């Protein structure tokens, strides 16, 4: 079990989380340039992207179907994974500390900025950082971008209602 925990910490780390949160923000702002995500929304990103089953369903979601299309996949007869949708909130609570560390690192490295008055997060740049991005994490970054695009036209209340989460 200790080996498994070590492997999880290698994959689910604040540095990777920081770039995933940045890519979510970039996707949001690309899809809806007039808005930026509110801080609470960032707490659902890692629990969705770092969870293989939810990320797999996210990966196959078309932008035009929106977040409702993503959520409806959990109840289709082929998938019947309604418990996965309901567990996003619990995973968000468990991963809260990782999200906070990732957010802090993302802000500290200049990937995103946080407007304290409005609680809005803004991507400082849309270009990848100058460091080499391993190809193994590109699918996670693309999925984070897609999740941002799916959420960008919705309010915080709508996202909470669709994903059955509490902010």
Image: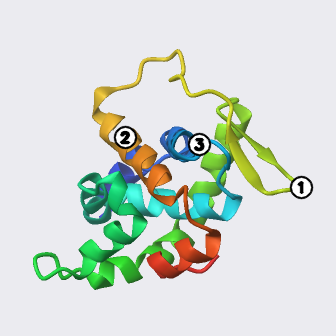
Please tell me the numbered disc located at residue 101: none
Toward which corner of the image does residue 140 lie, by quadrant?
top left
Q: Is residue 151 above or below residue 82?
A: above
The residue pinned by badge 3 equals 29
Coloring applied to the structure: rainbow
Report crowding for label 3: few under 14, some 14 to 19, many 20 or more residues within 10 A (C-alpha). Answer: many
The residue pinned by badge 2 equals 142
SS for callout 3: helix
Quadrant of the image containing the C terminus = bottom right
Instruction: Judge whether residue 116 can be spotted in this image.
Output: yes
Q: Is residue 23 above or below residue 165?
A: above
Which residue reaches farthest right? 117
CA gap, disc 1 and disc 2: 30 Å
Which residue reaches farthest top? 130
CA gap, disc 3 and disc 1: 19 Å
Q: Position of residue 58 (x, y in %)?
A: 31, 58
Q: In the displayed structure, does residue 101 sit left or right of residue 138?
A: right
Which residue is painted at 79% across and 57% down in the image? 119
Which residue is painted at 43% across and 48% down in the image? 144
Which residue reaches farthest left? 78
Which residue is painted at 49% across and 46% down in the image? 13
Label located before the other in sequence (2 or 3): 3
Q: Is residue 147 above or below residue 75?
A: above
Q: In the image shown, does 45 or 4 lie closer to the viewer?
A: 45
The residue pinned by badge 1 equals 117
Report crowding for label 1: few under 14, some 14 to 19, many 20 or more residues within 10 A (C-alpha). Answer: few
Q: In the image shown, does 94 or 45 lie closer to the viewer?
A: 45
């Amino acid at each position: 079990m200790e080996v498994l925990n070590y492997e999880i910490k290698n994959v689910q780390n604040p540095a990777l989380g920081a770039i995933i949160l940045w890519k979510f923000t970039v996707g949001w702002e690309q899809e809806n340039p007039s808005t930026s995500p509110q801080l609470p929304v960032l707490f659902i990103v890692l629990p969705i992207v770092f969870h293989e089953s939810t990320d797999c369903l996210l990966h196959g979601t078309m932008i035009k179907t929106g977040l409702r299309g993503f959520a409806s996949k959990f109840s289709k007869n082929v998938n019947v994974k309604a418990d996965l949708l309901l567990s996003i909130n619990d995973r968000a609570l468990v991963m809260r500390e990782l999200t906070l560390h990732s957010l802090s690192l993302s802000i500290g490295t200049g990937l995103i900025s946080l407007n304290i008055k409005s609680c809005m997060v803004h991507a400082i740049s849309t270009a990848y950082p100058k460091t080499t991005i391993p190809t193994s994490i590109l699918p996670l970054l693309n999925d984070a971008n897609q999740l941002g695009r799916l959420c960008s036209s919705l309010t915080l209340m709508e996202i909470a209602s669709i994903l059955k989460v509490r902010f």
